[in-house]
Image: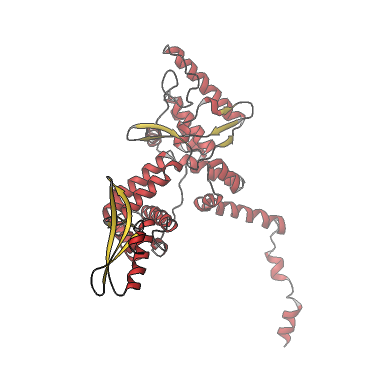
């Protein structure tokens, strides 16, 4: 690469064993930009250094004037994945990147980033009081971004592969009892809050997330087939409401029985009656959970959560709205539903997530199964005395004789 290959790089001799290599880095404001380095050695050493520099510039590892930083990688990666992620997911990703990762280690050179630096970052987060789960979420963000950098040719390997985030301490999920759920529904009805009562019933029966519940419209109810379609999720970011896809970007249909169907019919009639009393006309496709006269305004997720928590506290139950999702899952597993069916109802993209989160419910189910199998194979007769009185096998007799 000499003067004739100026479109990619230029090699210039500055002294007897000193060279300047320059790689073309595009144009900015009409001017050609170059990335330059000084190399010591023979001409072949300089040529190899120039070839390496050209490759680094073309792969985005080095920009005109400075190497690529971890913060710059995060910005590029977030912009790249934004069209393929839910609005709320991107909001949380950017929040983690801007508030935690970039201020601490965003200025580090991408090509010099080590697993040790990542481990030091994780330890600092833990000292600040972040839980292992929170630290691991930041590790997951970094691992994904650095993995993309490998694919883009910006780095040879992913340093997050060699990093060691804190071990995750599994916590058993807490769930309200069936009696508690029934008390919550009855309490909301006694308060005259049929919207909250409907939300509690739907959450406990379907296991849907709160944003999914808030996004439900009456057109999502298939009355003839007894199905509820969960296709959207409502989110609030910086006081702006938006509807996007579900967390896993998949629509799912959840079966509802006649009892739940009758409950929804009563809610729809109540909504019609309220609209009539306030002199409003229902919009063409009202939200199921709406406090507005025309049904055009949905309940907001935080408002629904706060209403649930106030009611639960007053009834002496405690807990959060999300625990209704756990109730649906554990009750289904305890009732004998297979994990794949439960995962589909909850909207888990992978049944392994269901297995991991609800392992305790599966253990309880396994104990029930053990009792069932033991009784089936051995019967209900106490066999202890018979086993104690039985003669030992022939082999034992021979050993005793010997």
Question: Where residue 292 sits in the image (x, y, percent)?
Answer: 41, 21
Please identify the quarter of the rendering in which residue 147 is found. Answer: bottom left
Depth check, front residue: 100 or 126: 100
Question: Where residue 350 sits in the image (x, y, percent)?
Answer: 54, 49
Residue located at (70% from left, 68% from top): 387
In the visual, does 107 lie left or right of 214?
left
In the rendered image, which quarter contains the C terminus? bottom right
Depth check, front residue: 114 or 264: 114
In the rendered image, which quarter contains the N terminus? bottom left
Does 316 appear above or below 172? above
Question: Where residue 122 sits in the image (x, y, percent)?
Answer: 33, 59
Residue located at (31% from left, 53% from top): 71
In the visual, does 247 lie left or right of 366?
left
Q: How is the image coloured?
A: secondary structure
Instruction: Tell me if I can see residue 119 in this picture.
Output: no
Report the label total. 0
Q: Residue furthest bottom?
A: 402
Instruction: Tell me if I can see residue 217 in this picture.
Output: yes
In the visual, does 296 lie left or right of 68?
right
Question: Where residue 240 sits in the image (x, y, percent)?
Answer: 35, 32
């Amino acid at each position: 690469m000499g003067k004739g290959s100026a479109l990619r790089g230029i090699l210039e001799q500055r002294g007897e064993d000193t060279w300047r290599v320059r790689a073309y880095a595009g144009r900015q404001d009409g001017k050609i930009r170059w990335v330059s380095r000084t190399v010591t050695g023979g001409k072949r050493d300089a040529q190899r250094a120039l070839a390496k520099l050209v490759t680094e510039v073309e792969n985005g590892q080095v920009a005109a004037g400075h190497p690529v930083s971890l913060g710059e990688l995060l910005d590029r990666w977030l912009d790249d994945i934004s069209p393929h992620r839910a609005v709320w997911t991107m909001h949380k990703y950017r929040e983690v990147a801007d508030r935690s990762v970039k201020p601490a280690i965003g200025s580090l050179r991408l090509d010099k980033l080590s697993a040790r630096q990542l481990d030091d970052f994780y330890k600092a987060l833990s000292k600040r009081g972040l839980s292992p789960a929170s630290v691991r979420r930041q590790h997951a963000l970094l691992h994904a971004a650095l993995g993309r950098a490998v694919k883009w040719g910006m780095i040879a390997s992913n340093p997050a592969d060699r990093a060691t985030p804190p071990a995750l301490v599994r916590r058993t999920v807490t769930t309200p009892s069936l009696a508690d759920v029934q008390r919550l529904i009855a309490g909301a009805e006694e308060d005259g809050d049929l919207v909250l009562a409907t939300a509690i019933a739907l959450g406990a029966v379907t296991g849907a997330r709160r944003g999914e519940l808030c996004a439900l419209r009456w057109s999502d109810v298939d009355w003839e087939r007894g199905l509820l379609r969960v296709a959207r999720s409502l989110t609030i970011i910086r006081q702006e409401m938006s509807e996007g896809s579900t967390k896993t970007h998949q629509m799912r249909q959840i079966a509802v029985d006649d009892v739940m169907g009758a409950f929804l019919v009563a809610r729809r009639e109540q909504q019609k009656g309220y609209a009539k009393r306030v002199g409003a006309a229902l919009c063409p496709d009202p939200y199921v959970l709406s406090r507005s006269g025309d049904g055009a305004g949905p309940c907001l997720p935080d408002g629904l959560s706060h209403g649930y928590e106030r009611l639960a506290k007053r009834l002496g139950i405690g807990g959060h709205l999300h625990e209704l999702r756990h109730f649906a899952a554990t009750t289904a597993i305890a009732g004998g539903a297979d994990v794949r069916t439960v995962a589909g109802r909850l909207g888990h993209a992978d049944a392994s997530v269901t297995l991991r989160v609800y392992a305790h419910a599966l253990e309880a189910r396994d104990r029930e199964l053990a009792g069932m199998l033991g009784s089936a194979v051995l019967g209900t007769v106490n066999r202890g005395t018979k086993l104690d009185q039985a003669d030992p096998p022939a082999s034992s007799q021979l050993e005793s004789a010997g």
